[in-house]
Each structure stands twice: as structure tokens, then as C-alpha cells.
Image (cartoon, helix red, strand yellow):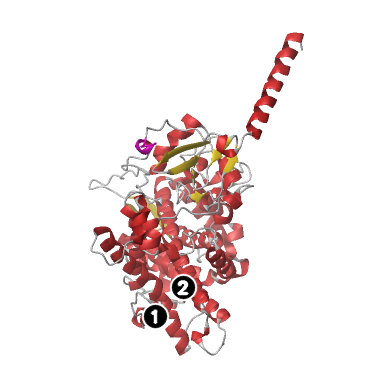
Amino acid sequence: MTPLTWAVVAAGVATAYLVHRRQSSRTPNQLPLPPGPKPLPLLGNILDFPPGDAPEFYHWLKHKDAYGPISSVSAMGVTLVLLHGRQAAHDILAGAHAAKTSGRPHMVFANDFVGFGRFVMPRGYDDIFRRGRKMLHQEVASPAATASFEGTQTAEARRLLVRALNDPGNWDQHCKTAIVAIILTVGYGYTVEPTKQDPLTTVNENMINAFTVAATPMTWLPDIFPILSHLPRNLPLPFLKAARRLRHDVDTAVFTPYRFVREQMAKGTERPSFVSNLIRRNLQDPEELDSMCPQDERDIIFTAVSLYAGGGDTVAISLTAFTMAMAIYPGVQRKAQAELDTVTGGDRLPTFKDRPQLPYLNALVKELHRWWPVSTLGVPHLADEDIVYDGYRIPKGAYIIPGVWSFLHDPESYPNPEVFEPARFLPLRNEPDPIQDAFGYGRRACPGRMFAEANLFATIAHTLAVFDIRKALDDEGREIEIKPKYRQGVLGYAEPFDVRVTPRSERHAELVRRFEKENPLESGDSVNLKMVSSWRSH
């Protein structure tokens, strides 16, 4: 180097050192918030929030180009920190700062008025959350538990084939029925009605709708003015009337299946399930069903319903994305079917034992999580303390939102990210595993991931073994193009689209008929249900 070059380098090093010393010596309150649009006096960044006519993640994507991997906006006394850099998300939510970012924002209307604050997943990182998460790990997330569900998952995947063969026009509803049937069997030992809408399925849909309505940001007065939490709940105010109606829907979904289990246990006719196993484990007197302590019973009730509420729609969304992808990418579908035929010989239905011999199909499931993440913006975390990251201050109480869709569609990690391409996860390419972003971060990562993935594998493997999924036809016999598009909302529902689901051949249809003949659909348990909105109401 020339003397001048050395001088420039030395000056640069000295400047960097002084900047580092200055930043490291500043207290968190002296550090700036992450960059973002300039706030207005009094209003803050209220005008920079999503307009409400498009999915939120599209709106926030512009922050990635404008401000980099971490940005912020503030309004109404709340700071939102948006993470569009994958490394920043893992550092802040799952790395050294995880202990400070494991909370959840408190939704006043949804949690306090409608009752979702009793559920495990919306809670902060408190004792109730930790107890519920432990229950889920014991009964759902362990390898032994996961393996024990395979019989149920296989049976319901095959019943899906029967329903689709007999009623091909309701494919989307058949997928939802199959997933809810698995969850109700695993969670409560409950069998859904085989050929008609089951009342518990309807109750669950009402609860999901209640959450969607109640959790919409800045829609309800108590979320804007939390002091309204102190009002008597029986006042004739519009938002209180709505809260009472929504809470009734929630409580019916919470207590009806729990009561079913208790009554079956009292008669000695219960099937093993998440709830019955936990009840037996927590009885102080093995001969007396009422000998649980009240806290244990509450934990069981609201942990079970979290499994029931959280597992159904999310897997159903992934199955909708699968259906869409197969119609748009027939080459992918044919390749997966060829792999299945090689393993099964084409003369039997697949099983979980086939899974290790199906690398392309397993990669297809991974690609679903990447191509169409169920949560385009991860569920917000709450900063429980002030955090310093990369020279910025994330204040206590900030909502921290990971840009999951942007991570999983980053062309630097996933070339041609808009294309559905399972081969990206096979050894020759070995692109980053999307699971680390698709199922949450750190202490808030989904404990039911293995259960959900097994549900997807069973359903997808059976579907592709028997059926072709094609684009629908218009009146002139031309294919109707499908444009992948998210609806607005917290979860990644797709805009409606039409497909044709038909047997690959008569031989494949016969596989389904043979199963139906040997395993006739059993009667459901709805005759034993009593709809209640309070466990103690009996």
C-alpha cells in the first residue's frame, strides 16, 4: 500500500472504533428506533399503516427496500418493529434476545371481552403458557406421540378419498373435514359424522370466525381505549353486544367437546385422547373424575382447544395451496405421482412406512411451506424489555413482526421464488429449510409442527396416489387460469379458485372403492354431544 492508502485505512479504522465506542456507551434510551417513515405530529405513522384493501404483508414489503432488514412505525402509543431480514428475525426472536421477545401483544377486545386470553397461544410467556406448552410437548410433539397418530391420519386421509370419489365437487370442504376429523380424534377421541356436516366442525368454524372478527386490529373501541375494560359487561353498547355473541360461540367450542370426553369417561366408553390422557394423569383420586384441582382442569380445557383451534385452519390453508400448486404445475404433480407409483407399485395406497422412500414428496411438503406460508407475517412477538440490536433501540412494549413471506421469497436464498419447485430441497440444490421460518420462532415456535407435517404428508400422499388435480374448464372447454392471490387477513387464505379432482384411472378409483367396502364409514359421535357454553352449566 502507498502511504496515502495506509493513511486512509488508518483513518477509517479509527473512525469506526470511535463510532462503536460512542454507540456502545450510549444508554438504550439514547439510541434511535429502527428507521421508518417520518411521523406526523400527534398522529405518528397512522397514515403509513396498511390501507385495508390488500394483504398487509404486501404493504410492509416496501419497507425492506426503503429501510433495510429492520424498520419501525409508531402510532397510538404503540411501536411496530418490522423484520424483513431473516438473520435479524432469528437473532431477535430465537437467539440471544429470545428471553426478552417471547411475549404476545395483548388484544384487549379478543382476549378480555371475547375470551381468547384463556387460550394458550395468545398468552404472554407466563406460567399458564408454559404449562400448556409442556402438555402439548408431552401429548403431541414427542416422537412417540407423533407415531401413535399415524393410524388416525392414514384412516382419515383414506376417508377423504372416499368422500372425494363420491362427491368430487366439494374437494375443499372434504379436505377441511379430514383435518378437523384428525384433530378431534386426537384431541377428544371424537369421531365426526361421515357424510354430513358435523356440529363440532360448525362450532369450530364459528370460533375461528370469532377470532378473525375480534382480533382485527384497531376495529374495536377497547383496543383503542383500554380503559373501557372496566365497564360492566351487560351494558347495551354495540361492542359489548358483539362481545357477548362472539364469546358464546367461543365458549361453546371450548366446553362442548370437553364435556363429551368427561361424559364418555364417566361411562367408561372414552377413546384415548389428548384430553382423556391428561385428565387421568392429573386426577388426585384415580377413581373420582372430579378430583382434579381447578387449575389443572382449566389448563387441560384451554390447551386442548388451542390444539383444536390452531391446527385445523392452518393445515387446511396448506392443503388449499397444495391443490392450487398441483393445478398450476402439472409437471410437479406427475413427478410426485411417479415416485409414489414406484414405491407402492400402483396397486396399493401409501402408508407412513413409505415416507423415507419418498424424497420428492417430502420436498413437495417443504415447498408448500415456502411457496405459500400460512402466516405471511409471523404472529407478533412482544418486547418484554428494551432491546438493543444493530445500534437501534427496540423499546419495551414494541410489537415485533417477522416478514415471513419475504424471507421465504428472497431470490438470494430461493432462486425464482415465485415458482413452485420441490427440487430446490433435494441434495443437488439444498436450499434453506423453510421450516425454521414457517412455524414460528424461539419459545413461541409451534409445538405441533411434526403433527401438522404428518397430517399434510398423509393427505397429500393419498391424494396424489389416486387423483389428478387439474384446472377447471369454462363453458367452451378451455382451462380457467388460476392466479395465486392471498386474501386480506391474519392467516394466508387464498382467493377462491376452481379445480377438477378426478381419479387417475379406473384402477385407482377401484383402490378407493375397495377401501370403502372393507372399511365402511363409521357413525359419528354427534348423537352424544350436548352443546354447552360453560363446563359447570351441567
Visible residue check, residue 420: no
**On residue 343, which mark appears?**
none
Q: Amino acid at mark 2?
A: Ile
Visible residue check, residue 362: yes
Considering only vertical position in the picture, is 326 above or below 65?
below
Q: Amino acid at mark 1?
A: Arg
Q: Is residue 357 left or right of residue 155?
A: right
Question: Which residue is more in the foreground, 60 or 477?
Answer: 60
Give the magenta range: 42-47
Residue 478, horizontal then vertical, whole percent: 28, 44
Question: What type of secondary structure mainly makes up the magenta span?
Answer: loop
Q: Nearer the viewer, mark 2 or mark 1?
A: 1
Considering only vertical position in the picture, is 400 above or below 131?
above
Residue 506, horizontal then vertical, whole percent: 39, 63
Which SS class for mark 2?
helix
Residue 309, horizontal then vertical, whole percent: 42, 64
User: Can residue 538 be found in the magenta stretch?
Assistant: no
Residue shown at 68% from the left, 19% from the top: 12
Question: Which residue is more in the foreground, 462 or 292?
Answer: 292
Label 2 or label 1, whichever comes before in sequence order = 2
> Quarter of the image containing the N terminus?
top right
> Quarter of the image containing the C terminus?
bottom left
Task: State yes or no: discs 2 and 1 in contact (Cβ < 8 Å).
Answer: no
Considering only vertical position in the picture, is 464 above or below 75?
below
Residue 268, horizontal then vertical, whole percent: 48, 88
**Residue for badge 2:** 301
**Residue for badge 1:** 536
